Image (cartoon, rainbow, N blue to C red):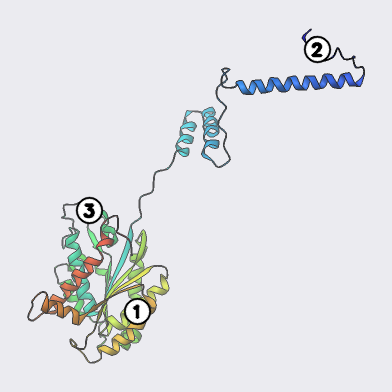
Amino acid sequence: GGEERRLGEKGGPRPARTGGGAAREGEARGWGLWRRRGERGRRGRGRGGRGPRPLVGLPGSGVESRQRVESRGARRGPAVATAVRRASAPSAEPAPAMREIVHIQAGQCGNQIGTKFWEVISDEHGIDPAGGYVGDSALQLERINVYYNESSSQKYVPRAALVDLEPGTMDSVRSGPFGHLFRPDNFIFGQTGAGNNWAKGHYTEGAELVDSVLDVVRKECEHCDCLQGFQLTHSLGGGTGSGMGTLLISKIREEYPDRIMNTFSVMPSPKVSDTVVEPYNATLSVHQLVENTDETYCIDNEALYDICFRTLKLTTPTYGDLNHLVSATMSGVTTSLRFPGQLNADL
């Protein structure tokens, strides 16, 4: 009745259609009625007791998969659902990797300042001459792995290779206060010496010993979780430290091209000179350092004597005094590598 009334208001009833026209009009009315019902149903969803529309996200977003996967797991059983939920949970941040440094000391000067360096940093980290921990702060052990390996018996062993072409310096290191701290296998030495001759250290005597040194270095590197680089202590005035030291640097650079190479190089001085060939040895070494190292700390013998005279007021400074000064400097510049801190960094 309402339909007829509306049609009548607009100008009287329309004549009834027959045949195909009536059928098409009936289909159109049915389609419109279905569409209106669908719209009402969609608008009412969530209020009509059916609950909110399920979360659907793009593939790869967290939403998509979590509900579907959890519901799939719930259908399979509680154990599977728990495993699925655990897998979809955000993972914890991984622990920061230890950034280890392999230390090498070559020649008489390099071994003496290197051994003094280990004495100073062992004292800072609370390590006694036998390798045991006697400190009182957690900060001492937080980044101890940068320079030390921890043995199965809770002893801390320096990650160091000690190299020389004559046995005398090695004997003095072994008989020193921290001689038992180092691994016995990491002492590599020859018998003849280089005689302050750069060519002997680089081409003849040193070249015969270099493979043994590289084997020790390789073993130390294989024990590292995340090796950051190498540091070498040597002098540029002698034969072993300058000749064999630069040979080691070039060989290590060949084998580990993407690791940092850092050296503490004691430079000769005309005022404080032991031998007449020191300038030649230094000249032959410097271009090797320029090509193959990333960082070089130049330690000037003359400046060390100057500090001992003027600042420390020592009338007759000995090599022990100079070595102590060098080790204090090395300890200072490596503090940011050995202790945690917001501004501290790796090599």
Foreground: 229 or 335? 335
Residue at x 81%, y 15% (from the top left corner): 10
Residue 341 image offset from top left, x and y in percent:
27, 55
| Residue 252 falls left or right of residue 41 | left
Residue 18 image offset from top left, x and y in percent:
92, 17
Residue 284 image offset from top left, x and y in percent:
33, 86
Q: Earlier in the sequence, mark 1 or mark 2?
A: 2
| Residue 162 falls left or right of residue 1 | left
Q: Amino acid at mark 3?
A: Leu
Q: Amino acid at mark 2?
A: Glu
The extreme right residue here reads 19
The local secondary structure at tag 2 comes to helix
Foreground: 109 or 178? 109
The crowd level at tag 1 (other Cα within 10 Å; few <14, some 14-19, many 20+) is: many
The local secondary structure at tag 1 comes to helix
The local secondary structure at tag 3 comes to helix
Quarter of the image that includes the N terminus: top right
| Residue 77 falls left or right of residue 244 | right
Look at the image and tell me whether residue 320 can be seen: no
Query: What separation in Å lies between label 3 and label 1 (alpha carbons)?
Result: 34 Å
| Residue 256 falls left or right of residue 276 | right
Residue identified by numbered label 2: 9
Quarter of the image that includes the C terminus: bottom left
Residue at x 56%, y 22% (from the top left corner): 46
Residue identified by numbered label 3: 139
Query: What separation in Å lies between label 1 and label 2 (alpha carbons)?
Result: 104 Å
Q: Is residue 286 above or below residue 295?
A: below
Q: Earlier in the sequence, mark 3 or mark 2?
A: 2
